[in-house]
Image (cartoon, grey):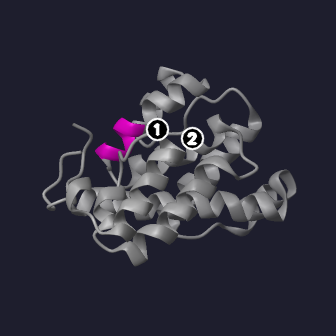
């Protein structure tokens, strides 16, 4: 990972940092993204990693749905590092190049289902307005339910945190 921040290396990590680092590697297979920066503050790194693991692997959303949300956040924050990490995952999950290109341009993507289109609309409006208007909120609740909508907002918020970290420290995959 490239960064303007001096990132910790495993040989010089504290026991607490090594334990979190090992858990990140176990759950994700790599430390791409903000994890090495967060490890400079283990008290931040552990709950951030746990929240990220939930947002990535344990919500009620299907992989293409969560990747759609992540890429919309990446586009909104112009986070190249987040985009570079998640576009291959999204492509493998079934989002095609036309969808990815529209997201990069911050336009409504040509999605295959009404559910995906509604997810995109929620993410784009929440990023742009920092809230959901009443009509969109009602459609989202009717289609996703309370629990899933809380998870959707959680994924969007978590990946905004990721984008801020990657952007602030100019972190990019090597």
| Residue density around tag 1, few if under 14, some if 14–19, many if 20 or more, within 10 Å | many
The residue labelled by disc 2 is 68
Query: For residue 47, which numbered disc appears in the image?
Result: none
Prevailing secondary structure of the magenta residues: helix
Residue 95 visible within the image: no
Residue 76 point in image, percent of width and height: 40, 53
Labelled pair 1, 2 in contact (Cβ < 8 Å): yes
Instruction: Residue at 71% x, 53% y: name it.
Output: 59
Identify which residue is drawn at 30% across, 44% down.
80
Horizontally, residue 149 falls left or right of residue 93, namely: right
User: What range of the chain is rendered magenta?
Assistant: 80-85
Q: Which mark is residue 103?
A: 1
Q: Nearer the viewer, residue 51 or 97?
A: 51
Q: Position of residue 90 (x, y in %)?
A: 53, 31
Q: Residue at x 82, y 65 (%)?
A: 146
Classify the position of the N terminus by image quarter: top left
The answer to whether one can see residue 150 in this image is yes
Residue at point 47%, 21% (across, down): 97
**Quarter of the image containing the C terminus?**
top left
Q: Position of residue 12 (x, y in %)?
A: 20, 61
């Amino acid at each position: 990972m490239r960064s303007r921040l001096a990132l910790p290396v495993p040989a010089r990590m504290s026991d607490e940092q090594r334990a979190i680092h090992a858990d990140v590697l176990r759950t994700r297979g790599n430390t791409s993204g903000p994890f090495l920066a967060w490890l400079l503050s283990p008290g931040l790194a552990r709950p951030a990693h746990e929240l990220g693991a939930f947002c990535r692997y344990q919500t009620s959303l299907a992989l293409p749905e969560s990747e759609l949300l992540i890429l919309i956040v990446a586009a909104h924050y112009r986070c190249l590092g987040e985009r570079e990490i998640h576009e291959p995952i999204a492509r493998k999950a079934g989002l095609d190049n036309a969808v990815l290109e529209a997201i990069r341009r911050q336009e409504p993507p040509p999605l295959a289902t009404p559910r995906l289109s509604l997810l995109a609309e929620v993410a784009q409006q929440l990023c742009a307005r920092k809230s959901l208007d009443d009509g969109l909120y009602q459609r989202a609740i009717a289609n996703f339910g309370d629990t899933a909508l809380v998870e959707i907002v959680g994924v969007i918020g978590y990946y905004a945190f990721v984008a801020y970290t990657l952007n602030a420290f100019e972190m990019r995959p090597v």
